[in-house]
Amino acid sequence: LGSAVFAPVCNLIISKAGFQTAFICFGLFILLVAVLSFFIIRTRPEEVGLLPYGKNEGDPVSENVLADAEKAQSSGFTLKESMSQAPFWFLVLFAMATSLVATNITSQTPSYLSKLEWSASTISLFLMGYGICSIIGKVIIGNILDKKGLLAGGYVGTVICLIALVSMVFVKSFAPISIFYVLFGAPGSMMCTVALPIYVSKLFGDKYFSSIFSTLSILTTVGAIISSFGSGVIIDQFGFPVMYIVDIVCILLAAVGFTSALKTNKFNKEVKA
């Protein structure tokens, strides 16, 4: 939703008031959202009298459901125990690889379109489309993970990413770029943001979820930092298509990461892989 709304808004502010004013406006907005989030966000739906997705949302929350939720939060590996296990490092591979690709796409593709002599307004329109597809993608990938299992859902997201990236390698006209933004903006690009916390919860439990997930998030940021510099070097030396080929390799590595993590799982042997 943010990309869909703020891409055209950002374009308007920059064109009317300049980059500095745009940065100030969005900085203030982020501060406002952070404050509001503190009062709105809860750890589990049961805390506000709701049931998790798919649990007959219209029914009242029973004491048993609350007890199960409390039990889930009371078990799990510590961060140190998690880091001593192979699944943690496979998830590091998954998180860094998907973050690297997502950063490449969001930071470099607008430059690619600009090089193809697209106007700023047209590029902002495509970024808005990317944001809209991202909203849909989060719902889709969540449903796939629920219905098909964590492994099958991960494979679906991987295939969609590959199709989207291949379309960019051979981009010659409007159509392949459209395919890219629709497919990558949908389930493909949502693998890290949607699947990673689910994998962490299922593989290591909920008790120490925050410390484990925050550590993985830091390593995800490392992938983004590497991508920000590395993608620029690759583009300067070899061109944009080669960058997308590197992204394809990273997506395949991410698939190896989540597959290996689920196959070597020790905490929850009942995970639907």
Image: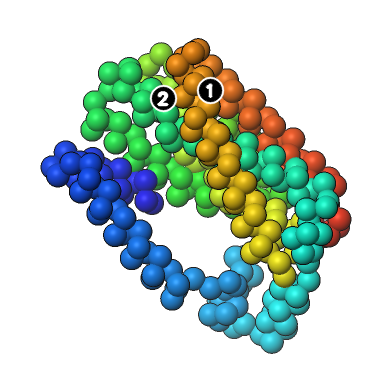
Question: Does residue 140 appear anywhere in the picture?
Answer: no
Q: Secondary structure at mark 2?
A: helix
Residue at x 71% of width, y 49% of height: 150
Pointer 1 or 2: first along the chain:
2
Query: What is the x, y in percent for residue 231?
Result: 50, 26
The answer to whether residue 236 is left or right of residue 226 is left
| 261 with respect to 220 (left or right) | right
Q: Which residue is mark 1?
A: 244
Classify residue 122 as left or right of residue 2. left
Identify which amino acid the numbered label 1 is placed on: Tyr
Q: Is residue 69 above or below residue 83?
A: below
Q: Are marks 1 and 2 in contact (CB under 8 Å)?
A: no
Q: Position of residue 103 (x, y in %)?
A: 49, 36
Residue 236 lies left or right of residue 81; in this view the side is left
User: Counting other residues with Cα less than 10 Å from the Cα at mark 2, is it few (<14), some (14-19), or many (20 or more)?
Assistant: many
Quarter holding residue 63: bottom right
Q: Please say if 39 is above or below 158.
A: below
Residue at numbered disc 2: 177
Helix, strand or loop at label 1? It is helix
Residue occupying the point 35% across, 37% down: 127
Q: Choose mark 1 or mark 2, whichever is in front.
A: 1
Q: What is the x, y in percent for residue 142?
A: 59, 52
